[in-house]
Each structure stands twice: as C-alpha cells, then as structure tokens.
Image (tube, rainbow, N blue to C red):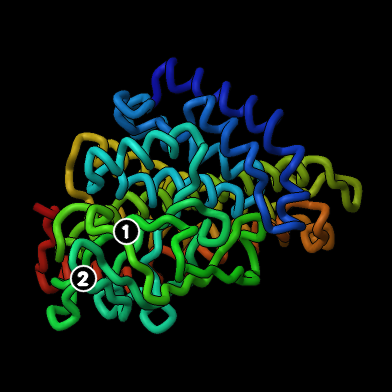
Amino acid sequence: MYFTEEHDFFRKSFQDFLKKEVVPHINKWEETGQIERFIWKKMGEMGYFGINYPEAYGGLELDLFYTVIFLEELQRVNSGGFAAAMWAHAYLAMTHVNAEGSDAIKEKYLTKSITGEMIGCMAVTEPFGGSDVAGMRSTAIKKGDTYVLNGSKTFITNGVYCDYMVVAAKTNPELGSKGISIFIVDKDTPGVSATKLDKLGWRASDTGEIAFDNVVIPASNLMGEEGKGFPYIMQHFALERLIMGVNAHARAEYALEYALQYMSERTTFGKTIDKYQALRHRFSDLYADMEVNKQYNYHVTSRLDKGEYVVKEATISKLKSTKMADEVIYDCLQFLGGYGYMEEYPMARLLRDSRLGPIGGGTSEILREIIAKMVIDKKEYKKAT
C-alpha cells in the first residue's frame, strides 16, 4: 500500500550503508558521547540528508515514505542518540531552513546541510519553559540592521557540536506567543556558549544547554516574518511528532525481533522459552500493539505527504507510539531475563533510549491537553500563512 520497489531498494541500500559505515563505530560514540564528523559527510554524500529537499539545493525531492525508511532503519543500529542526531539535523533544523529561510540562507545553510558539511540544531526549549513554547524568555531586540539575542535554551540535540542553530526568541515580548520570531545563528558567533548535558540515554548524541549573551546577528538572519515564529514552530511540530511516533514503532519492532530470536534459542526445562504459553501470549499482545501503531503511523504519513494538516493525528501518533514502545521494550528485556540487564545485549540501551520518547518533542501530558483542546473544545490549529 505504501512502499514501492524503489522504496525497498532504498531500504536495502541504507541497511548496507549503516552496517558497513555506522554500526562498527556505535559503541565508541556511545562511550565518548561524540559522533565523528566523517559520518555526517558520508551520510551527505549518499544523499540521506536531502531526501525531502529541493533539487536546487542538492536534495532528492522524494516522498515521506523514504523518510519513514530512513527513520526505521536508524532505530536498528541500537543507538537512539545516533538516530536522534541524524533526524534532528535533517528534520528539525533543516525543515525550518527550507521552509522559512531566505534564498540566501538556503544557499548558504541548506546546501551544506544536505552534503553533511554543516550540522544544524533546533533551539526552542528553555530551562524554565519546557513544553511551554509561548512562555519562552529569550529575546531578540532589533537594533539598527541587527538583532541582539539574549537568553538560554536547554535539551538541544546537536547543540554542542553543531555549526548553526535555528533559534526561537521574542522580538516583541509584550505580545506573548505573537511576538516570537525565528533566526539562524552561527555557533561560533561571539556570545554563544554551549554546555554538554549528561543523560540517561541517547548517549551518543550531544545534548546541550546553550546561552546567548548579547549575541549580535544581522537582521538578514531572521527567517520568515517577524512575529510568525510560534505558528511556524507549531506547523512543523506535526512532522516532529510523527517522526517520534515512527521512531517508536520501529524500535519496538526491533526489540520484538531480537527478543523472539533469543526466545527461540534459549532453552529451559527441555524446551525453548518461545513455547511457554505465558510468554507466547504476552509476546502476541506486544506485537499486536506495535503493529496497530505502525499502520496508524503509515496512514498519517500518507496524509501528511499529500499536504494535509495532520497536527491532531501526529500528536496521537507520538502519544500512543512512544508509550507502546516503552511497554514493549520493558517486557522484551524481561524475556531475556538476566541477559536483558547486561550492557552487552541491546535491551538495556534500548530501554534507556526509549524513555525519552514520552518526554521530548512535547511531553505526553502536554500532548493529551492538545488533543483535548481539539477534540473536546473544538479548537482548530491552522497552517502559518
């Protein structure tokens, strides 16, 4: 229904690339907390960062199901941190550069992002705001032909080793959410500093707390219209949440496949443990939950690919899929018994990495309130105009 022979060929080639170029380095990157620059350039050379972007800037202009394959296969290298670094670059930072950036910004930043020469991050979340985007305190006050940026951001994926940041700040603080604008800021601009955070999971990726101290940027670094930052962010949240939903069903599927392989080989009391009814039935429930979420996510992807505004559906995708993945992986670790608790087996890392799902990109509690506003209060979210 959703995947053609071309999609299947792309999946196979990406699997081969990851097996050869990425998997041998994963444990080192998990230990050091830093993904070496060479892999970004190799990913760029293969076109993996340009899947959905215009050919004019070196992209491939392919449909969203190529993105689904990209996300699903990244989950199978068993490093949520590596996967997050890749998709945060390609689908958080680059999405805004492509959608709101001027021709000059796209020529400078999008082109080199697609080749992997530049790494981007999206800096919205703040220490005091969390999921409350409208409550951000960072400001960008216009001064002549420049803006002066002050404030701080936190939990920013790629925030330490990036080359540029897509930053949200208030240009008119008195207007609340209607006073937020979006800027592109070079990481090496005077006044920008980043501190690396120590995390439970996603250990291969660099997650940063970023400070802006009287950072002067050209007025031309404004992306889109001044004061339109909040609807821009809300509009792209649909893609971010769907991405996290797809990530969730993919890592759950990987966990189930690994657990089943283990169960088919592990013998107790004269038979393999996949023959015990209690385990078989629990596995069946977990598999069913994964499959329901996967098919729902494919359906939402199809609608988004057609240009439909699927903020409600994408919010549901993230809410339900991330909860499902945590439950699946928790029980898959249990299927492995003591070995599930060992770092040399994949479940321990999977469990840690998966726990970020219901937190990042809007907590499950916030998502439930967004759904309630749409379903109960009949609130309508609209595309930025």
Q: Position of residue 97 (x, y in %)?
A: 31, 46
In what element is the residue under mark 1? helix
On screen, 345 above or below 372?
Answer: above
Q: Which mark is residue 316?
A: 1
Q: Is residue 180 left or right of residue 297?
A: left
Q: Position of residue 83 (x, y in %)?
A: 56, 47
Q: Which mark is residue 143?
A: 2
Question: Image quarter for residue 331?
Answer: bottom right
Q: Position of residue 160 (x, y in %)?
A: 56, 61
Residue at point 36%, 39% (across, down)? 108
Q: Name the residue type under label 2.
A: Lys
Tell me how far mark 2 sits from mark 1, CA to CA.
Answer: 42 Å
How many C-alpha atoms fall within 10 Å of the one at disc 1: few (<14), some, or many (≥20)? many
Question: Image quarter for residue 174?
Answer: bottom left
In what element is the residue under mark 2? strand
Query: In this rendering, does residue 218 appear at all?
Result: yes
Residue at point 65%, 37% (across, down)? 38
